[in-house]
Image (cartoon, helix red, strand yellow):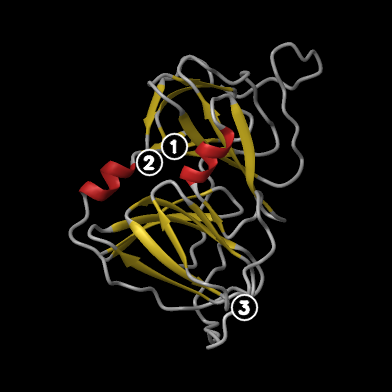
């Protein structure tokens, strides 16, 4: 999966339904984009298929499940069962194997380092170890969409699901009509995966409105102003991914702000 490609200087709207439509039966995978820190791609597996178990010594790999049911074996911990909308994190130096179960193909986004490979295999012990003592976000092995919705209740709300040396990933819950505060950040890009609902993204000036729905990805380059609205019924969920530092955010009422890029 090691690939070196340029970070897009233009906004991107990646419709997962379009990606799926151009492929035949699983298994298949497709590289989607890079943000400079991560390679992001899509993997489709049929029920019963399993990846080649491996580990990464120097970064946390994580995934966003978009469809189906998937069982994960991470390190020597008990199995994890995930479904659409869930986020799964494998800490560095922990072996992981991934198997699709259930009755339909699975779809999962992988988020890993550009130098990622499967050279380090590792072995799973026959003796299970207790799961890490992390009972609330961030950095849980499994962040269940269903459990988060039950825990936080009515929007608006936000919570951090991942916070490590390379990424911050914040899950944002909004109701119809709720918006963010239009802003831009000159020193880092941002991208979102829509886990539930419908949202619009107004990016820059005089650009077409991006209308995103469940499963879509929206990428905004550094320096571009963006205004996000939740437009569908019910709770919308978007997972916002940025770098882990240099969080300089500017709004129109900040006289010291550098101008946004259009």
In this view, the residue farthest toward the right is: 256
Q: Earlier in the sequence, mark 1 or mark 2?
A: 1
Cα separation between marks 3 and 1: 34 Å
Classed neighbour count for the residue bearing mark 1: other residues with Cα under 10 Å, few (<14), some (14–19), many (≥20): many
> On the image, numbered disc 2 is attached to which residue?
215
In this view, the residue farthest toward the left is: 24
- Coordinates of residue 112 in the picture (x, y in percent): 54, 60
Q: Is residue 90 left or right of residue 136?
A: left
> On the image, numbered disc 1 is attached to which residue?
194
Image quadrant in which you'd find residue 77: bottom right
Q: Are marks 1 and 2 in contact (CB under 8 Å)?
A: yes
Point out which mark residue 68 bears. none
Q: Is residue 10 visible?
A: no
Q: Is residue 24 above or below residue 8?
A: below
Classed neighbour count for the residue bearing mark 3: other residues with Cα under 10 Å, few (<14), some (14–19), many (≥20): few
Q: Earlier in the sequence, mark 3 or mark 1?
A: 3
Foreground label between 2 and 3: 3
Foreground of the two, 78 or 227: 78
Foreground of the two, 33 or 57: 57
Quarter that holds the N terminus: bottom left
Residue depicted at x 61% and y 18%: 182
Foreground label between 3 and 1: 3
Residue depicted at x 61% and y 29%: 157
Point out which mark residue 129 bears. 3
Quarter that holds the C terminus: top right
Q: Is residue 65 above or below residue 236?
A: below
């Amino acid at each position: 999966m090691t690939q070196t490609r340029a970070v897009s200087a233009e906004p991107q709207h990646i419709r997962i339904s379009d990606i799926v439509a151009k492929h035949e039966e699983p298994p298949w995978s497709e590289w989607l984009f890079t943000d400079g820190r991560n390679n992001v791609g899509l993997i489709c597996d049929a029920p019963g298929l399993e990846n080649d178990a491996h580990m990464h010594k120097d970064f946390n790999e994580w995934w966003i499940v978009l469809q189906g049911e998937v069982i994960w074996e991470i390190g020597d911990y008990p199995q994890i069962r995930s479904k659409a909308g869930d986020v799964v994190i494998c800490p560095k130096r922990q072996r992981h194997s991934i198997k699709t179960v259930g009755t339909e193909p699975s779809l999962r986004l992988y988020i890993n380092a550009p130098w990622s490979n499967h050279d380090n295999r590792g072995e799973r012990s026959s003796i299970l170890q207790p799961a890490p003592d992390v009972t609330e976000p961030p950095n849980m092995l499994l962040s269940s969409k269903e459990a988060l919705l039950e825990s936080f209740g009515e929007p608006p709300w936000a919570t951090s699901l991942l916070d490590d040396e390379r990424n911050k990933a914040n899950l944002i819950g909004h109701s119809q009509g709720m918006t963010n505060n239009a802003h831009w950040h000159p020193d880092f890009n941002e991208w979102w995966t829509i886990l539930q609902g419908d949202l619009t993204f107004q990016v820059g000036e005089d650009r077409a409105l991006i209308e995103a729905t469940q499963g879509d990805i929206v990428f905004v380059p550094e320096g571009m102003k963006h205004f996000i609205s939740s437009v569908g019924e019910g709770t919308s969920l978007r997972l916002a991914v940025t770098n882990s530092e240099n969080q300089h955010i500017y709004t129109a009422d900040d006289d010291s702000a550098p101008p946004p890029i259009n």
